[in-house]
Amino acid sequence: MISENEMDNISEIVEKSGLKHIAFIMDGNGRWATKRGLPREFGHKAGAETFKKIVRYCRSIGIKTATVYAFSTENIKRPKREVNAIFRLLGEYVEEGKEEKDVEFKFIGAPEELGEDVYKKVTELESVTKGGKSRVNVAFNYGGRAEIVHAVNKLLKDNKTVITEDDISANVYTSDVGDPDLIIRTGNEVRISNFLLWQCAYSELYFSETLWPDFSTDELDKAIMDFSHRSRRWGGLDTKK
Ligand code: FPP
């Protein structure tokens, strides 16, 4: 348990370190369930609980934006039973999300390709929560390369003939909240897996061995402390030295 003092302290660290946006690759749900002799769907259910806890905590310590990788464009290849379980969790979460205070939800990716039922749910949550002070981006049917292609095609449609980096930054799904300062991947895998490929150019990366359902606010504090000691140079020299 984190005491109020420690919480004040971590909020201060968040503010001083300029940490505004954290993205999470929530990996390890399936292994968590298998280790317990349970079907993989149970891991996603436990993972959804962790997701709720972590995004609420982010908000309470002053993180303005949390982006989570909930369903990649490749995840549709998983067994129907597992895919349906994730869609069901999404539906349940949409109902709970509508009750959250002061948080705006945005779905990034191509959820419209997942059928009318899913799309209706995500657009409903987006419209009910519009204008909330903090932001949760849920990547659902998301792929990083597809996102860049989507941005370029939008620009071509606007008759752009020369495309700049700023143009692409202004046309990726997260353009209104900026790039993630920190990307955390759980589940003991050290790769990006087609997540926020454009936006991660200067993100700090943090890899945790913990399986996502076991990821705790204490471990998030540890990642934030670690972030606060990094020297971000964006390709330049350290101005603090
Ligand atoms: C990766 O773990 C996780 C996913 C593909 C799904 C993430 C979904 C949730 C956390 C719950 C749903 C949340 C919402 C918002 C609907 P994995 O299954 O690849 O784990 P493994 O590597 O152990 O197999």
Image: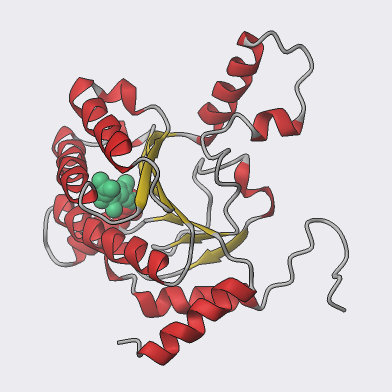
Colour logic: secondary structure
Q: Position of residue 147 (x, y in %)?
A: 53, 30
Write down the quadrant of residue 226 in the picture. bottom right
Q: Name the residue located 46 percent from the left edge and 84 percent from the top edge.
A: 8
Classify 46 as above or below 152: below
Q: Name the residue located 27 percent from the left edge and 25 percent from the top edge.
A: 114
Which image quarter is the C terminus in?
Answer: bottom right
Front residue of this view, candidates 126 and 239: 126
Classify 188 as above or below 98: below
Q: Position of residue 144 (x, y in %)?
A: 53, 36
Tell how many labels. 0
Q: Is residue 72 left or right of residue 39?
A: right
Q: Is residue 135 left or right of residue 83?
A: right
Q: Position of residue 158 (x, y in %)?
A: 64, 11
Q: Name the residue located 33 percent from the left edge and 74 percent from the top edge.
A: 216
Classify 129 as above or below 19: above
Which image quarter is the N terminus in?
Answer: bottom left
Write down the quadrant of residue 102 in the picture. bottom left
Q: Name the residue located 27 percent from the left edge and 57 percent from the top edge.
A: 29
Q: Position of residue 31 (x, y in %)?
A: 26, 60
